[in-house]
Amino acid sequence: MTTHSIDQPIPAHPIAVVILAAGKGTRMKSDLHKVLHPIAGRPMLLHLVASAAALQPAKTVVVTGAGREQVEAAVAPLGIATALQAEQLGTGHAVAQAREALAGFEGDVLILYGDVPLVTATTMQRMIDRLHADDTPAVVVLGFRPENPGAYGRVIADAAGRMDRIVEYKDASEAERAVTLCNSGLMAVRSSDLFALLDRLGNDNAAGEYYLTDIVELAAAAGRSSAVIETGADEVAGVNSRGELASVEGAWQATRRAQAMADGVTLIAPDTVWFSHDTVLGRDVVIEPNVVLGPGARIADGVTIHAFSHVEGATVGKGANVGPFARLRPGADLHADAKVGNFVEIKKAVIGEGAKVSHLSYIGDADIGAGANIGAGTITCNYDGYFKYRTVIGAGAFIGSNSALVAPVTVGAGAIVAAGSVLTEDVEADALALVRPPQTARAGWAKRFRDGMIARKAAQASGK
C-alpha cells in the first residue's frame, strides 16, 4: 500500500515535495502519460502525492514535460503546482525547473519520481530525519539493494552510510559496478543547498546530461558530507513498461491482501482477490475466490462476498451476502443482512435491510424496502433512451419472477406483483398487481403444427 499515516506533529522544518514526471515513457507504448497509468485504481502519480501529503508539505511541485497537459489536468484539482522541463537534459536539469515554483521557500526539499509510486510516508520521513541528524548531511539519498543491480547507479559509501559519491553505471569502473548498494534517485536536500548545488552542475559525462546525483560530489568538494539510508527494493520499484506496471501492481496487491487478513478478513484464495487503493473492509468479512473490489467499495462487518463478484463504488452493510457472479455498480447501497445473489446487477439503488434480490435481475435507480423479495429475472426499466427514472418498492413487497417495472413507478409496502407482469402504474400497499394476458389453450394445435411442418420439409427435400 502506498499511503501510510504516521504519528507526526506539524513539521518542525517546512517541507516541499518535487516530483519528476517529465519523461516520455516510450516503453509503455501508450497515449496515456506513464505516471497516470493506474495501480489499484489510482494513477501512480497520485499514489505518490497521497503518501507525501502525510508529511504536510508546504508546497508540492510536479515537473512535467512530454504529455504535460494530461499531468497538469490530473494534479490541478489538488492545487498542486507544475513546472515545465521543455528539454530533457537530465534529472538535475529537471529539478532546477522547480526553482520558480519554490521561490521564497525555506526548508527541506524531497525529490521523488512519479514512476516510483510505492514509496511510503514513513520512508520519506526517515529521509527528512536523517537530513537533520547531528552530522547535518548536505544530501540524503535513498538507496536499495536489488537482486540484480544491473545498470543502476551505484552509491559509494562507508558502513555508517556516509557517502563519497554516486556513480552512474555507464560511468562506473569495474570495482564500482561490483558495489550492491544502488541509487533509487530519491533525495532530501535543504532548499538553501539545493539550487546552489544545481547551479554548479556540469554535463561532462557519457550521456551529456546534468545528473542530479552529481550534487553529492559537489557538496563533498565544498567540504560537506552526504548520507544514504536504505529501503527494500520493492518500495522503490520503478515503472517503465507494462510488465513493470504489472509487477508493481502485484506487489501492491500482495501487501494489501496481507493487511486485510491481519485485520480480520478471510480470503479463501488471496492471490485471486483484487483491491483498490481506497477499499474499506470490516471484520469477519469473507471473500471467496476471484472477487474484484473496484474504487469506492465499502464493506461492513460480517459480509460474505461469493466468488466472481465485482464491487465498485458500492456500500455493503453488516451481514449482507453478495454473489456469486454479482455486480455492484456505483451507488449500490446494501443495508444490513440484504442479499444480492448470482447474476444480479445493482446500480444506484438502495437494497433495504433483509431485502433479497436473489437471481438473474437488474435493479437500477431504485429503492427497495426492508424485507422485500425480488423474484428471478426482474428488471427495473429505468432508462427511456434520454432520461433515468426511479423505481420505489415498499417494505415487505413481493415482486414475482420475470417482471419488468417501467419507471417511474411505485409498489407499496406489502404489495404483490404477479410473475411475468409489465408494470407501468403504481401499486398501492397490500394490493395484487397482475399484468399479463389470460392464458388460453387450443387443443391439438401443437400436433397439427408439427405434422404440417414435417410434411413441408419432406416436400422441399424431394424437390416437389
Image (spheres, rainbow, N blue to C red):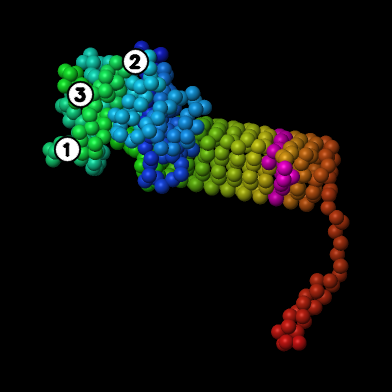
Give the magenta range.
Answer: 364-386
Q: Is residue 459 above or below residue 283?
A: below
| Magenta region includes residue 7 | no
Left or right: 49 as drawn, with respect to 135: right
Residue type at mark 3 is: Leu
Q: Quadrant of residue 201?
A: top left
Left or right: 59 as drawn, with respect to 327: left
Report helix, strand or loop for mark 3: helix
Foreground residue among 29 and 42? 29
What residue is pinned by disc 3? 218
| Magenta region includes residue 376 | yes
Question: Which quadrant would the C terminus be assigned to in this image?
Answer: bottom right
Q: Residue 172 carries which label?
A: 1
Q: Is residue 312 above or below residue 449?
A: above
Cα–Cα span, label 3 and label 2: 20 Å
Report helix, strand or loop for mark 2: loop
Residue type at mark 1 is: Ala
Neighbourhood count class around disc 1 (C-alpha, 10 Å): few under 14, some 14–19, many 20 upward: some
Left or right: 271 as drawn, with respect to 372: left
Residue type at mark 2 is: Gly
Question: Which quadrant would the N terminus be assigned to in this image?
Answer: top left
Left or right: 318 as drawn, with respect to 458: left
Residue 290: x and y, percent?
50, 47
Residue 191: x and y, percent?
31, 18
Q: Which of marks 3 and 1 is nearer the N terminus?
A: 1
Neighbourhood count class around disc 2 (C-alpha, 10 Å): few under 14, some 14–19, many 20 upward: some
Report helix, strand or loop for mark 1: loop
Residue 232: x and y, percent?
29, 33
Given this view, does label 3 or label 2 mark the residue nearer the observer? 3
Q: Is residue 272 above or below residue 145?
A: below
What residue is pinned by disc 2? 107
Neighbourhood count class around disc 3 (C-alpha, 10 Å): few under 14, some 14–19, many 20 upward: some
